Structure formats: C-alpha cells, structure tokens
Image: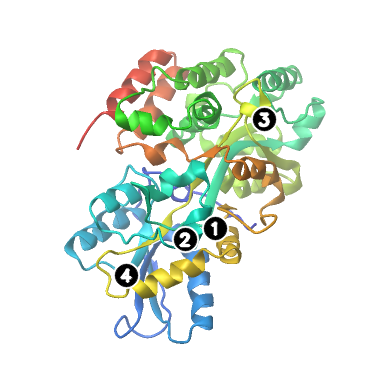
Amino acid sequence: MALDQTVSRRRLLQLMGGAAAVGTLAACGGNGGGSSSGGQLKVIGAGSQEAGLRKALDDYKKANSDFDFNLSFSPADQLQTALRAQLAAGNAPDMHAVYPGNGSAMSMVQLSKANLLTDLSSQSWTQKIPEGFKGAFQQDGKTFIFSPGTSVLGAIYNKKAFASAGVEPPTTWSELLTVCDKLKKKGIVPIALGAQTPWVTQLIDYALVPGTVYAKTPDFDDKMIAGNASFGDSGWADAMDKYLELQKRGFFNDNPNGTTYEQATSMVGTGKAAMAVQVSAVLQAFRDASPSPDDLGMFPFPATDVAADNWIPGGIVVGIAVSAKSKRAEQAKKFIEYCGQPEVVSAWSQAVACVPLYSDGDAKVDPVLTSFLPYLKDNKAVPFMDQRWPNAEVQPTHFAVVQELLGGKTTVQGALKKMDEAYRKTA
C-alpha cells in the first residue's frame, strides 16, 4: 500500500478524519472533461482524497459512457466554510467530501441533522460496515457517507532496536512494561514522544482507550451523548494513569513537551528510540527517517493484561456524500454504490494509505499492518475518539491537558474534568 512520503499536521488530520482538520492551502482541481454545464456530476473532494476519488470516478466513467463529471478539490478550511455555506444556500455540488462522525461543520452528523445529505441506507454495501464504525457513518440508524476505510493507530517500532534488546512486540500491558524496561537498560529510549506537536499528545490515550473503555462498554459514546457517562468516571482515567506510568518509569525521551513530532520520528527511524505510538498514515515518514524501510514494523499497542480484551483505534478517513438538494442525486448514488464494491474499496484504500473497510478474502494492505486486520474482522476496533465528540472543543482541550499532565501541572481527574466540561459545551 503506497504511503505519502511526508505527512503534515493538516494531512494527518484529514487522513484521521478528525474534527480538528484545518488549513489554508489553495484548492486544486481537475475534471472529467468539458465545463460544469450539461449532464456532468459536480464533485468537490478533500485534498487527501484525490488519488482514490479521481481513480474511482475515472474507472466508473470508462464503464459508463453516459457518465461525466466535473471534479475539484478543496482544502479543509474551505470545506468547513465555503462548502458548508453552499450546502445551506442550496447551491452545493452534487457530491462532496464529508468528515465522518461529528465535531465539525462538515461532519456527517452536523450535515445530516441539518437535512443536507441524501440517505444511502438502501445501498447493499452499508450492511458491511463493521459494528464499531457505524457511528462514523450513521446518524439515527441511517447511513449518509461512504468512506473506503480506516487509518489504524498503534506502535511503529524499529526492529533492530527491539532485536538488540532481545524483545518482541508485546501483546499485553505487562509485557509492554517489560519490553520498555529491557530497552531502557540497553540505553535505548523505549518510546519517542513528540508532545510539543499538539496532535501527538492524544495518540497514546487513543491507543489505550479502546481497551480500557470500549472493550468493556462498547456503547460508551452513546452513553456520553445521553449524559449517562463521563470521562472522569470511565476507563479514560485508567488510560491516563497508564500514560503517566510510562513517563514515571522513564520510558519516554527527556522533555516530551519540548520534543517535536519530526524529532520523535527521527529517533525511531535511526534506532535511538525503539517505538512511537502513531497512525499508520505516517509510516512512510518513519521509513524516510530510517536507513532501511524494512527496519520498521507496527503492532497494536496493548492496554490490558488480557490480550483478548485489547481493542484498536481506527480513524475512518474522509468520505463522500450526496447533497440532499442535488438534481443528479440518483446518478451520484449509483456512483457511490459502485464505490462500495470490495475491489473499488480496496483500490481506493490503497491509494490513500488506509486499511479497507471490508474485503472479499484477504485485504491488500501494507504488510506491516497485517496484525491489525483480525481486530477489524472481529469488530474489536472503534473510531478515533473525537469522531463522536459533539463539538470541536474537546479535542484541543485534550491536547492541552495531556501537556499539563506531562508537565506535572494537573492531575488525571483535573484533566478529565476539563474534558467533561468541554464535552458539555453547546453552540
């Protein structure tokens, strides 16, 4: 599976489908031929979709001579402002990018609540959405977006560093601590953490919470929405305690709050550090920092002492939807039905560096991601936590409180109290 050679913060958040995606890039575009008049389907995608969406549209057009389209791409800031305004005014494109879950102006939940999206529930592919990911695709039991798959999160590790300490990828929390201890005794930083870069702060929590929260309470997000649960009284506290335990045992590099993502990437690539908790989307950046790409692997980051109870996080990548006011809605829906075929899902997911949402037989993914596939197959995967948060306040609050925790400026309960307060904010 091809991966980007470099991944900026904006690119990463687009791949993760996170609500915090922002940007100021100039839009880029292309089309399927001719002007936007006539019978063309007008399509606006997110920049991160280009390789997969353009290929799907071109292939569909080759097989359907009566199909034509006008395709352009927009950066995240324009999607969140200009495109949302067009949707509200009734002059939006026929088909456009939508972020999964909730938490931004262009998220599936926000748009479907405003009756701006066409219901896709009658399409056969919607029955294949894994249970744990339905919240990213569905609102009130109805499916409103298509997305080809997920970018998984785990530990990217240096195989030579592991070999020098005589350790293998752990499958339980206790094994992880033992592995880290042996690496530290070998003079190797066990876990590189570039917490000066805000989005990096969230990743260890995101890796642990599927096991400490969702494995025990799969409907935790629903309970949060209903007001019957909180961060402070959940397994989030266990996850943050474990985060701090890694720091207290000296398993991070010195001064994580003064270390950038790029510096942490270099540490793992060169073997100065053994691993970093990251999304699969940045594998190529780590490979670029390594003398040999084959030196790097990836494994699910364990959160509990029962291997079977460990789940993984997977962020559904930005998807596409049909405008509720489109005059070519049926044409657009036929294209999305085509996209739902396993071979198209596979081709699109490979083009944008993610694991296919589903497949016939073995999914074609980067070999280092194969250890994550059983979790997806067994419904032991959940969306990145922010994809079901009700607003755009929780994620930056999470960034800040983790930095405060690492700096000794707050407690776990103090941090979670701030997150609960941010969660309950209304527009």
Q: Residue at x 56, y 48 (%)?
A: 281
Q: Residues within 10 Å of mark 4 (few under 14, many from 20)?
A: many
Q: Are marks 3 and 2 in contact (CB under 8 Å)?
A: no
Q: Residues within 10 Å of mark 3 (few under 14, many from 20)?
A: many
Question: Closer to the N terminus: mark 2 or mark 4?
Answer: 2
Point out the frontmost of discs 1 and 3: 1
**Quadrant for the N terminus in the image:** bottom right
Point out the frontmost of discs 2 and 4: 4
Q: Residues within 10 Å of mark 2 (few under 14, many from 20)?
A: many
Q: Are marks 2 and 4 in contact (CB under 8 Å)?
A: no
Q: Position of residue 186 (x, y in %)?
A: 76, 20
Tell me if 378 is positioned left or right of 178 in this view. Answer: left
Q: Which residue is mark 1?
A: 352
Q: Quadrant of residue 306?
A: top right
**Quadrant for the C terminus in the image:** top left
Q: Position of residue 153 (x, y in %)?
A: 57, 39
Q: Which residue is mark 4?
A: 94
**In the image shown, does 309 or 167 lie closer to the viewer?**
309
Q: Quadrant of residue 102?
A: top left
Question: Where residue 49 is drawn, which disc sits there?
Answer: 2
Q: Residue at x 52, y 49 (%)?
A: 7
Question: Closer to the N terminus: mark 1 or mark 3?
Answer: 3
Question: Closer to the N terminus: mark 4 or mark 1?
Answer: 4
Question: Where residue 95 is drawn, which disc sits there?
Answer: none
Question: Closer to the N terminus: mark 3 or mark 2?
Answer: 2
Real-space Cα separation, disc 3 to disc 4, in angstroms: 48 Å
**In the image shown, does 233 or 140 lie closer to the viewer?**
140
Q: What SS does tag 1 mark?
A: loop
